[in-house]
Amino acid sequence: MLNEQELEKSALFHGIGYQDYCEILSCFQAVQRSFRADDLIYDFTSDAVGVVERGQASLIRIDEDGVATVLEDLGAGGVFGKTLAFAGTTGDSLEVVCRRPCDVVFLDYSHIFTSCSHACTRHSTLVRNMLKLVADKAQALSCRVDVLSRRSIREKLLCYFRQLAQQAGGATFTLPFSLSTLADYTATDRSAMMRELKRLREEGSVRSDGRQFTLRQ
């Protein structure tokens, strides 16, 4: 459960007071759970909508050959659910996996978009916030498509790095996950990606220190 300070930063509960937040969890039959790194959070067999409150998780697609691809990075405010997912190819499956210890609140989908009998303001606010999260999710997936549409590993990396730099408001940004996950995110072989990243560093196109990167202007 969020404390009052964390509630103020929550995208899902933005504009909702702490007392109303507590009542919403009861009214919406919300279930809150904590997960450790590598735990399976969600396997898309239920209609619940999950929202990451703390920590970090990843939406992963696993094809029929067992190859995993990261579709989306989910930080605080990240939303996922069966009703929000794109239909996959036959034989593929989707999972949400915990990357860093996180807390997740699960809300019953029918309660979110069913009119409240009391027509309470907090319900309308929650629905509005949820729709914004969904819109943000669509934007994130659009950015991912932009990366995957590039033909070479170099172009994929530079496209993604430019996106992160734009979000950071400058040439320097922090990679939100490990290099292994970056290979999954860009749908590239890790060894080949590391070789290309080394070339980018050697030619001066990219500088890096741990997970902090700087693009050459």
Image: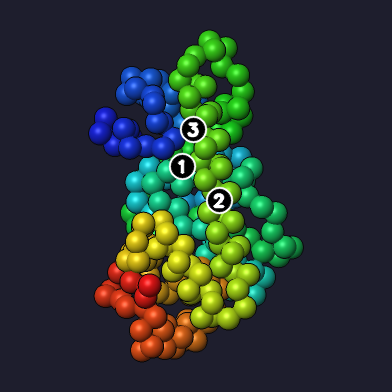
Q: For the N terminus, which image quadrant?
A: top left
Chain-order first, disc 2 or disc 3: 3
Tag 3, which secondary structure?
helix
| Circles 2 and 3 in contact, beta carbons < 8 Å | no
Q: For the C terminus, which image quadrant?
A: bottom left
Rounded to the nearest angstrom, the CA distance separating label 3 from label 1 is 12 Å
Chain-order first, disc 2 or disc 1: 1
- Asked whether residue 82 appears in the rendered view, the answer is yes
Residue type for callout 1: Val
Tag 2, which secondary structure?
helix
Colouring method of the image: rainbow
Estimate how packed mark 1 is, as few (under 14), some (14 to 19) or many (20 or more) residues with alpha carbons within 10 Å: many
Residue type for callout 2: Gln
* Residue to which mark 3 is pinned: 129
Chain-order first, disc 3 or disc 1: 1
Q: From the top left corner, tell me how far across and down residue 148 is, in percent.
A: 59, 69
Tag 1, which secondary structure?
strand
Rounded to the nearest angstrom, the CA distance separating label 2 from label 1 is 17 Å
Which mark is drawn over residue 137? none
* Residue to which mark 2 is pinned: 139
**Residue at x-position 29% and y-position 37%:** 6
Compare residues 139 and 57 and report the one nearer the observer.
Answer: 139
Residue type for callout 3: Asn
Which mark is drawn over residue 51? 1
Q: Is residue 94 above or below residue 113?
A: below
| Circles 2 and 1 in contact, beta carbons < 8 Å | no
